[in-house]
Structure formats: structure tokens, C-alpha cells
Amino acid sequence: EDQVTQSPEALRLQEGESSSLNCSYTVSGLRGLFWYRQDPGKGPEFLFTLYSAGEEKEKERLKATLTKKESFLHITAPKPEDSATYLCAVQAWSNDYKLSFGAGTTVTVRA
Amino acid sequence: GAVVSQHPSWVICKSGTSVKIECRSLDFQATTMFWYRQFPKQSLMLMATSNEGSKATYEQGVEKDKFLINHASLTLSTLTVTSAHPEDSSFYICSARDRFQGSYEQYFGPGTRLTVT
């Protein structure tokens, strides 16, 4: 069974204080690892897809990296508008496009 | 691009009644859509996979007779919660995968908040 563990559960940052979120995963045959952002009361917003170890993707202040066992989401010089819950999900080749989600990391950025 | 809508955004119904939630892909075709539910401060739990023109596949523990899913076209899937009870109150979110896109990400709708009184 696919497993996704995210840490920390919550992260409080000062504006401009860079940090990283961790996503550890166990999956038999990774098709892709996905990062989403979710604001309260809304559906998840797609951020990145990573397919193979060593791959990196960037979008504004966010950078996602992937190894064979975990993924990191780096937030550089965060702003209050980066406050959200960040969800990590994996998809296995054998799993018919299903996503298995982690519990998420709730990031709060104070001005 | 890749916009998914849901209707309604919130609904309140009485115990014992049924409620239908629509999920539409607005600018792409989706042979596969997914339905999730999310309880407060918890992550998304997959309920079922909806394939256009065929029966939905339900996850273990999800009652197929209670949560009826229909995927009648490449842009529309519906979830009907039958004989709703207060414990069915939750945030229901759908997602869709673009059939012509080479990547595998799912795009999510804004969610529907269901409250059963």
C-alpha cells in the first residue's frame, strides 16, 4: 500500500524566512509525485509534478525536489500570501491514476 | 486552462433526502474523474474513480448504493448522496485528468460543502 508522510504538520514562518517541507513516500513503482496547495474551504491547486529522482521544478518562491524516498518543497523568502496547506501525493504505475495524499503541512507566514 | 467547476458550492439538506453534486471540466475532456471527501483538518480521501461511459470504481469501505456516481460525458460527472445522514456532512471535491495531456496530474474543483441536518 502506498504511504505518504508529510512533516512538519504545521510551520509558522516570519515573512522572508525560508524553509522546507518534507514528503516521505513508499510506493511500488512511482509514476509521479505531486505537490498541491490548498487554501481553507477550497479545492487543491496544482503546483508541480516530479517524475524521477534528481528532478527539480520551480515556480516563483517555490522549488520542489525529488529523491528515491522523499520530496522537499522549499519556500524561499515567503510572503503572507504563501500561507496555505501544502499537500503531497503519489501515483503508482499500478494504480490507475489514483492519488494517495499525505496529511499536509499547514504553513503560516507572518508579516 | 485545466479548470474544473463544481455545483453547488454548498448545500444544506434534511436527513433522509438525496443531493446531487456536479463536476465539470470546463476547458478539457476528461475520461476519468475522481471523487474525494475531506473532513476538517484532514487530508483528501479518495471515494471513487469515475470513468466516462462505464461504472465507477469505489474504494474499500465506500457504499456504492449510497454514493451514486454517473459519468455521462467527457466533461461531466455527478455524485448523488442518497438518503443523506448527518455523518455524510463533509467537503466533497472532484478532480479530473486531461485525456490528451501527456502528464498525469489531476485538476481539482473548488469543492462542495454538504451539511445534513
Image: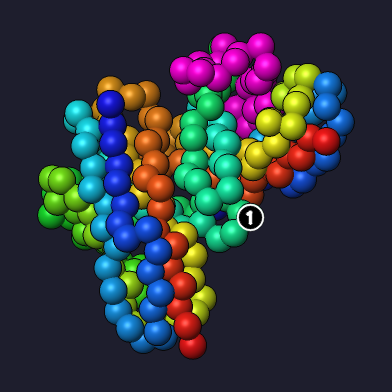
User: What residue type is disc 1 on?
Assistant: Gly
- Is residue B29 at least partly visible in the picture? no
Find numbered disc 1 in the image and state the secondary structure of the residue it sits on: loop
Magenta-span inclusion, residue B78: yes
Instruction: Using the image, name the chain to which the residue with label 1 belongs.
Output: A
Magenta-span inclusion, residue A46: no
Residue bounds of the magenta highlight? B55-79
Where's residue B16, x and y in %?
Answer: 83, 21
- Is residue A99 at least partly visible in the picture? yes
> Where is the N terminus of chain A found, in terms of image quarters?
top left
Residue at horizontal 69%, vertical 43%? B112
Left or right of B17? Residue A31 is: left
Where's residue B10, x and y in %?
Answer: 77, 45
Where's residue A109, x and y in %?
Answer: 45, 78
Where's residue A21, x and y in %?
Answer: 29, 63
Left or right of A73? Residue A79 is: right
Residue at horizontal 53%, vertical 27%? B47
B15 or B29, which is in the foreground? B15
B29 or B49, which is in the foreground? B49
Residue at horizontal 40%, vertical 74%? A12
Residue at horizontal 63%, vertical 49%? B110
